Image (tube, grey):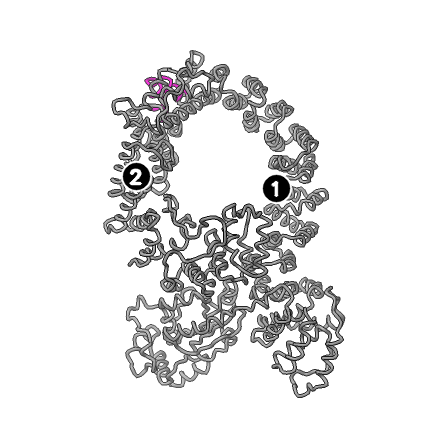
Amino acid sequence: MLLAITLMMLAAAPACAQKDDSALDQELMKSLGNPLGEIVDEAPAASSALPPDAAAMPEESSDETTRPALDEPLQGAIIGLTAGMQKAQVDQKPAFVIASGKSCPWCYRLKQEMRKLEIAQVLQRWTLIEVDVDASPEDAEKLGVSAIPALRLLTTTGQDVARHDGYLAAAALLAWLEENHDAAANRTDNLLLGADPPNAGSVLKLIRHLDDRDPLVRQAAIGRLQVVPELSGEPLLNAFEGGSLAKRLAILEIFDQWNAPIEAIDPWRPEAIDEQVFARLREWNAQRQPQGAAVKKLSTKEMDAAQLQIDRLLQASLADGAVIAARLARHAEALLPEVVRRLQDAQTDEERTKLRALRYRLVANDALVLRFPGGLARLASSDALVRRQAAQQLVSLATAAEQPLLLELFSDADPLIRETALRGLQEMGGERATESLAKLLKDPEPNVRAAVLQQLAEGASPAMLADVAAYVKMEKDADLLVHAIRYLREISQPQSAQALLDLLPHENWQVRAEAAEALKELDYDELGENPELLADLKAALIFRLSDDDPFVVSRAAEALTQQMSADAIQPLFVAAERHPAIAAEILKNLAYHADEYPSVSAHFRKLLENKEPAMRIAAVMGLTRADAQTLLEWLPLALNDESAKVRSVGAAALFQQMEIERDSAKELILDGGSASAAVSRGSSRFFGLENPFGFGNRKGKNGADEGANPTSSHPWEVWLSQYSAGENRTKYGPKILNPLTKMMESEDPEERITAALVLVPLGHQQTALPVILETVRQSPELINRALAILPWISWEQRQDLFATLYPIAEQQLQQQLALRAASSALDSRAADLLWPLLAKENVDLEMAAGIHLSLMNAYFGKSYWYGGDLSTSKRKKIVTAAEKHAETGNEMESLVALQLLAKVDQQLAFQLAAEIAEDSARPDPLRRNAFQISLLLTPEEEQVARLLAALNSGQAERRELAFVMLIAGSEDRSLSRIYDTFAFSWPYNELSMSGPPGPIIPTLPGSLNIEDVRPWSKHPSAKIRAYAGYALALAGEVEGLDPLLEYWRTEANRDSVTNVLVYRAIAKLNAVQHLDILRTIYNPEQFGYSENQRFYWTIRIMSGDEALELRKKIRDEVGMSNLR
């Protein structure tokens, strides 16, 4: 009975294949008598049931909890043949298909072998596809599966390269994959991809492809040969005479396009093709007339034949349909209207998908079909996401030959696809692309016009200026005019300015506002000597100030303040009074022009009497910027205003001026000036006072450090004391002090605390400080204002007040402000307030970064320091504190300490980082980061040696880091940053351009042995494989380009570092077939001066006409003088 059931199973489904039939029978018998979970346990126990190669079989685990289910998919596998082949085509990786079944123990064992590390690494080069023969019998049929497990290797176009039925042990599977990879990768002959007509030598090579097993290759060869009948006619006749059936069919297809006398030729009966037939063909070839390049209308007979082919295509499989479409593509645009008509009448999604793919095939060239396998089908997919991804990939591959296809993509209803196609057209540039875009501006569909305009605004090419200027005169849709304006504002030329000027009176408010704003964005220096145009622009903008729409007024006002004139001042103030909601912005911009136009201050003073509080507030703000020198004249009016808000703004204006004085004094003391000189410098700068004390004797930088003269008072304390006592600063009389004192009694907490802030530095600490403390306790939301007083009080007061205020600062932004305020006094003792905060357990990365900046401020007086003179006492103080916290602190504490220490004693920081990295008692994340820091801080002359030594580390993570750092160097700025926050100086960069400009020959870094690189090429990480490929390419191994380019082709990986590695590798190998990639990378605007040099002199070592053409393009665009 069991045997009968077994035979029934074998007849019903693909068999579970194995070399030893008796072993297979026994295994199957066991599977019928036991649950699936027991198969793995029992099979190894029966030695008689094992196949002859059982020694190579994997050991099975008896642990039921860790053993995968028999039908569990392999990690990373795509389920289903169709989805898998799409993935293979997108990723440009050949397909490795495993067909299996749920009740097949050998399938399970094969999958166990494939989970081994050495197989998993090799599978990175393949698209892994799983087919369940029970769930997808149609896929099994396509693959010709008769026994399982069945293995198939396919090209990205679906061509079968290699087959194996049955189990393979890991070693045998590895060898089989390696043996067949190159054939499956199917490197396309560059002759098939060329854009120029083939020469006589190329013709013979192309003829060899006419019997290729891949129909797409055959069709590409046909297309290339067909365009040069004068060269290919005679060689094709010779090839036809002795060729295979496949080659004869392909040649007949070419002859048919040339209208050759082939009616009587039957390629299936070679014996009937006699000498008379060949003589007739040779006579025809000798007398053949050249054919015109214009698209000819199809005859009735040709159209009927094409219709039949379309009908066949709609019923055909994907692979057969691609071949039919390739033949129909010979009719090109002549057949396009009929395909569009049938597409409109299509009834099902499948019909629409196939007809869309045919539509695209008619305008696509054969080379693209090979470079973009399956791409046209994906562009036509009913899945919008698939279409979008395919469109993105097309743009990355597209050359000028793909312009017709990109234009055809505008028939897609998806705006994202239209946008992608438009971007591709614009990136190509050239006269033809400009004509195509201009044509699209006349498209009857508004969405198409909008997509064109949006893309033009992003690229901002002047080539389209005339077309867009003409377009805005005709367009009636306001939304589309807005899109056009956003393009015009990017082009600072008289024609664009005139077009914008003509749109200022438009009936739609949004068009008027956008036009005014666009005029603000123009670079008037680039408009040339055109006084009449400039005068018209200013007059039109002034007129717009009377517009009824406040937003239009605001845009016109902003445009005018960018190009101010005396005529505009009065209308601008009038506009501000008419529209209080936008007054603050108008008045702020006017304040910038107070020095140039004295009447601005007079208008501001007049506004102090305006009945609206908002206008009076704007007036105070404007006068603070425009007329601070006469503050004593207008400020009393603000401090006695009936509005508490106006009074608060007036007090804040005074405090702002005092803050500027404080910053000025701080800078002068840092430069070695005395405290008294700092006071008078600050006062004279803002209040017009003379400097009776001069600037004193200037010492060396930081000569006033608190440790320089232990017997003297702290310089900052001296300055505060003098300022508080009123020495060498403006004397504020009762007109200022009385209103401020009265304001401290206000019911408005904001008014009270602002007045107190001003009075503390002016010597009223005993009365004002309690007001600040009491107010902030009652109104914690005012904590930011309270914190501003910290730099203005003595060290003892600062410690106490910081301890009181910091707990009130509950939000991280408030805490960061507290740190900054505590450290902004020129007093390194503030560090004692900051270090303890790092020791707290809840300190996150952002907070640690803020504390680090505040420590810099405390120690150096600023948040940055690039070296220079530093007093011995201050250096010792920093080193002592940083060393202590690095050695004993938590992770954040140690990282901040190491970064600080690296600025004053790099050698010590290096030693500490190296010690922490090896200290097993420290946290693992800290040890990892410390190891990286130690690599960054290694002395420059030892960098390469230490990175090479790290490659032999016992820890995989360290080896990987060292390998990436060795290849990318400081070109990858992320490597010199810990958590993308703590930055360290790192000079090592093998990719940089050193010495005078000249040809750059990329070489391997240091003494890196290429044999040590090879293992990295099988690493699970795509990035590390790419870097290994780069190193192999530099060693002259072409295969290294594959993983590098595969990594680069993923948009997210295409950064500046990868770009450099790619063009260096291509140049070193002189891989001229990848010049399209070099053209994609070349971007003179983003490159900048030095990168243009590096790119040019790197590809200078390449040969070939296309490389010469690219270098000439660079010289023309960048200028040879900028490349030297």
Q: Residue placed farthest to the left in the image?
A: 921
> Mark 1 sits on what residue?
490
Q: Does the magenta portion include 570? A: no
Compared to residue 895, the image places residue 1011 above or below, namely below
Badge number at residue 838 = 2
Compared to residue 670, the image places residue 980 above or below, namely below
Task: Specify the principal SS of the magenta part.
Answer: helix
Residue 747 in view: no
Q: Nearer the viewer, residue 992 or 934?
A: 992
Q: Badge 1 local density, few (<14 within 10 Å), some, or many (20+)?
A: many
Amino acid carrying label 1: it is Glu
Q: Badge 2 local density, few (<14 within 10 Å), some, or many (20+)?
A: many
Q: Look at the numbered disc 2 and give the secondary structure of its residue.
A: helix
Amino acid carrying label 2: it is Leu
Q: CA distance from mark 2 to mark 1?
A: 48 Å
Residue 841 in view: yes
Q: Is residue 142 left or right of residue 983?
A: right
| Residue 226, image quadrant | bottom right
Of the 4 image quadrants, the one containing the N terminus is bottom left
The residue positioned 54% from the left and 52% from the top of the image is: 1082
Compared to residue 444, the image places residue 685 above or below, namely above
Q: Does the magenta portion include 767? A: yes
Which mark is nearer the camera, 2 or 1?
A: 1
- The stretch of residues the image draws in magenta is 755-776
Q: Is residue 580 left or right of residue 259?
A: left
Q: Nearer the viewer, residue 953 or 560?
A: 953
How far across and down, in percent of the image, does residue 898 sit?
31, 42
